[in-house]
Image (cartoon, rainbow, N blue to C red):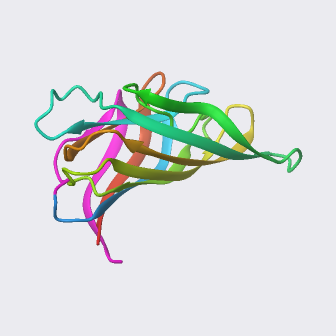
């Protein structure tokens, strides 16, 4: 399927990056590409939340998620794949997309969040995330997330932030797919 670049958002010591336009019925799904998001704080996780069209604009929709992670030490030792209990069960918090992103000069996180059918007013909105994190403890984490936004209303806004501190640098690109 063809992807169309809709917007590019460049971080510069931002508390959050809120995308409040461009998610419409024009596309069946949307991809958010994170390129080298670098946090101000060490050991934080990238999170996201959405707003339903016509809602209270509080970025507080009910979401369900699950996560598993492949990990490898920087020296190539001690690789593992495991379920991670950082998932969210019917909560309105910003669910994690990754964790332990380091803030050393050479550390960041990158990945792709796909939001399926955000304009539907019948079904919940499914999402997946796959990304890689250069962690504070000199490990690499490959995160795999799946979940859904538990509302039947259309979704038209999305917010990204770290679990603590600012997004110092990095780029988020939003694409329409389909």
Query: Which image quarter holds the N terminus?
Result: bottom left
Please give the name of the residue rendered at 41% of the width and 29% of the height, measured from the top-left corner.
Answer: 94
Estimate the x, y position of residue 116 in percent, counting from the top left: 34, 57
Q: Position of residue 130 (x, y in %)?
A: 54, 53
Q: Can I make out residue 97 in this image? A: no
Quadrant location of the C terminus in the rendered image: bottom left
As rendered, which of 124 and 112 lies closer to the eye?
Answer: 124
Rendered position, 89 above or below 113: above
Q: Can you see residue 13?
A: yes
Q: Main secondary structure of the magenta part?
A: strand
In the image shown, does 16 or 12 lie closer to the viewer?
16
Work out whether residue 115 or residue 12 is closer to the camera in this orientation and state it. 115
29 in magenta: no
Q: Which residues are magenta?
A: 1-24
In this rendering, the answer to whether 173 lies above or below 92 is below
Q: Quadrant of residue 54?
A: top left
């Amino acid at each position: 399927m063809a992807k169309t670049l809709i917007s590019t958002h460049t971080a510069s010591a931002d508390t959050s990056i809120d995308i409040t336009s461009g998610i419409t019925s024009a596309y069946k799904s949307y991809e958010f590409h994170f390129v080298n998001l670098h946090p101000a704080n060490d050991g934080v996780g990238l999170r996201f939340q959405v707003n339903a069209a016509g809602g209270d604009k509080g970025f507080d929709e009910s979401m369900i998620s699950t996560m598993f992670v492949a990990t490898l030490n920087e020296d190539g030792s001690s690789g593992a794949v495991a379920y991670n209990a950082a998932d969210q069960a019917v909560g309105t918090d910003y669910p994690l997309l990754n964790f332990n992103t380091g803030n050393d000069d050479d550390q960041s996180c990158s990945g792709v969040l796909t939001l399926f059918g955000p304009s539907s007013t019948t079904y919940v909105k499914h999402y997946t995330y796959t990304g890689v994190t250069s962690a504070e403890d000199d490990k690499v984490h490959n995160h795999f997330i799946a979940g859904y936004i538990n509302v039947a209303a259309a979704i038209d806004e999305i917010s990204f932030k770290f679990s603590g501190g600012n997004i110092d640098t990095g780029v988020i690109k939003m694409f329409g797919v389909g």
